[in-house]
């Protein structure tokens, strides 16, 4: 491997540009060496912005780089991740792992036998307050975690009706598979990745399908309701084999305030984690001197979590050691939970997931 890691990016849209901005601020020697996209205009913009080689086909780029980032729409994750792994490269793929469970399982099978490794982009794990909370859990300060309330809610936040985000054939789902993937992963991460045994839930499409959809701002352009074929909110309840439970509320659009709040209940202490303002508060009750409540606000740094995730990936590439966090196995569990929520919504009944299935 060269002294400076040569990094290639597949899928040269807005998400790729966010990654590039952060990569250029890493204190590690890494070069944005090349990019792949089927769109000629995207290739031209990327080449001019980053002085990088560009390709229409990924195979040609694989010969020139040490590792790749896959930031394509969900449907194409499998195609490029598997090809990169088969070429012996390390991969960081944006969440979710894939657009369907079958596709995610094929990626997992490829990763299991690959020379390189695959890391999945659940970057919210790398937020400072999240890492502080996990530290308290590992130290035993929380006792046994029994329940987590996970919220990722936007009052209005459909990411461009008519874009690939709102097309089931490309994205695989809507709010649940987009921002819900983050909420499920973070809840399971804080709970220390227990086995999931049962999932119930419901998904809805109430706002994105409305031609009169009202909003203040939209991440992409609004092309109307015709190309909206996914959910815009979901509610679920997840039971784990160790007794931990997770309640989930996800929405791209709903008539309530935005929220990225997580409430963690432990036998020794509880916590409120708010990713919107990067805050963490601990809740304890004791009888030291006199019975009392103790509420502690934790102040942390505000390191960009995606930049920290990228630094971890680059370090793993350089060391040749697969990272222990953000693994394909963990991402596959998230995918199976999302698939179970969709199935529970379709059937109106809870879905059982045994250890052999999740």
Image (cartoon, rainbow, N blue to C red):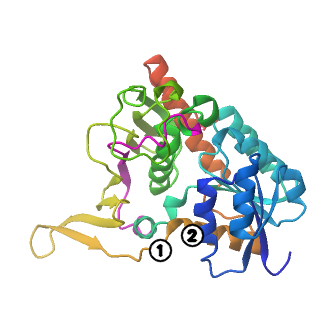
Q: For residue 303, which numbered disc appears in the image?
A: 1
Q: Residue at x 83, y 48 (%)?
A: 83
In the picture shown, does residue 315 fall above or below 357? below
In the picture shown, does residue 323 fall above or below 331? below
Q: Residue at x 72, y 75 (%)?
A: 30
In which quadrant of the rendered view does residue 53 lie?
bottom right
Q: Residue at x 50, y 35 (%)?
A: 174
For the question of whether residue 352 can be seen, the reply is no
Residue to which mark 2 is pinned: 307
In which quadrant of the rendered view does residue 356 lie?
top right
Compare residues 343 and 233 and report the one nearer the observer.
233
* Residue 150 in picture, x, y percent from top left: 37, 47
Rounded to the nearest angstrom, the CA distance separating label 2 from label 1 is 8 Å
Magenta highlight on residue 147: yes
Quadrant, the N terminus: bottom right
Residue range in magenta is: 135-164
Q: Secondary structure at mark 1?
A: loop
Q: Secondary structure at mark 2?
A: helix
């Amino acid at each position: 491997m060269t002294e400076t890691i040569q990094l290639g990016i597949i899928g040269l849209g807005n998400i790729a540009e966010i990654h590039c901005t952060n990569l250029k601020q890493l204190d590690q020697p890494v070069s944005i060496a090349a990019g792949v996209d089927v769109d000629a205009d995207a290739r031209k913009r990327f080449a001019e912005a980053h002085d990088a080689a560009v390709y229409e086909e990924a195979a040609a780029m694989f010969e020139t780089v040490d590792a790749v980032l896959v930031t394509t729409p969900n449907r194409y994750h499998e195609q490029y991740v598997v090809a990169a792994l088969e070429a012996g490269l390390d991969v960081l793929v944006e969440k979710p792992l894939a657009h369907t469970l079958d596709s995610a399982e094929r990626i997992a099978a490829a990763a299991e036998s690959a020379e390189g490794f695959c890391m999945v982009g659940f970057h919210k794990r790398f937020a400072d307050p999240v890492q502080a909370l996990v530290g308290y859990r590992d130290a035993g300060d929380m006792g046994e975690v029994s329940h987590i309330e996970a919220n990722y809610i936007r009052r209005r936040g459909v990411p461009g009706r008519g874009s690939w985000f709102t097309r089931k054939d490309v994205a695989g789902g809507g709010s649940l598979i987009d921002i819900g993937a983050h909420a499920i992963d973070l809840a399971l991460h804080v709970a220390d990745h227990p086995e999931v045994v049962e999932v119930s839930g419901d998904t809805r499409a109430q706002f994105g399908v409305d031609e009169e959809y009202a909003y203040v701002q939209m991440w992409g352009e609004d092309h109307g309701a015709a190309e909206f074929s996914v959910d815009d909110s979901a509610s679920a309840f997840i039971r784990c084999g160790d007794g931990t439970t997770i309640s989930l509320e996800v929405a791209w659009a709903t008539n309530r305030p935005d929220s990225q709040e997580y409430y963690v209940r432990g036998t020794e202490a509880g916590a409120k984690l708010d990713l919107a303002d990067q805050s963490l508060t601990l809740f304890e009750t004791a009888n030291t001197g006199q019975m009392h409540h103790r509420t502690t606000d934790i102040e942390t740094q505000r390191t960009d979590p995606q930049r920290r995730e990228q630094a971890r990936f680059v370090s793993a590439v350089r060391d040749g050691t697969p990272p222990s966090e953000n693994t394909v196995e963990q991402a596959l569990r998230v995918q199976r939970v999302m698939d179970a929520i969709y199935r529970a919504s379709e059937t109106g009944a809870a879905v059982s997931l045994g250890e052999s299935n999740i």
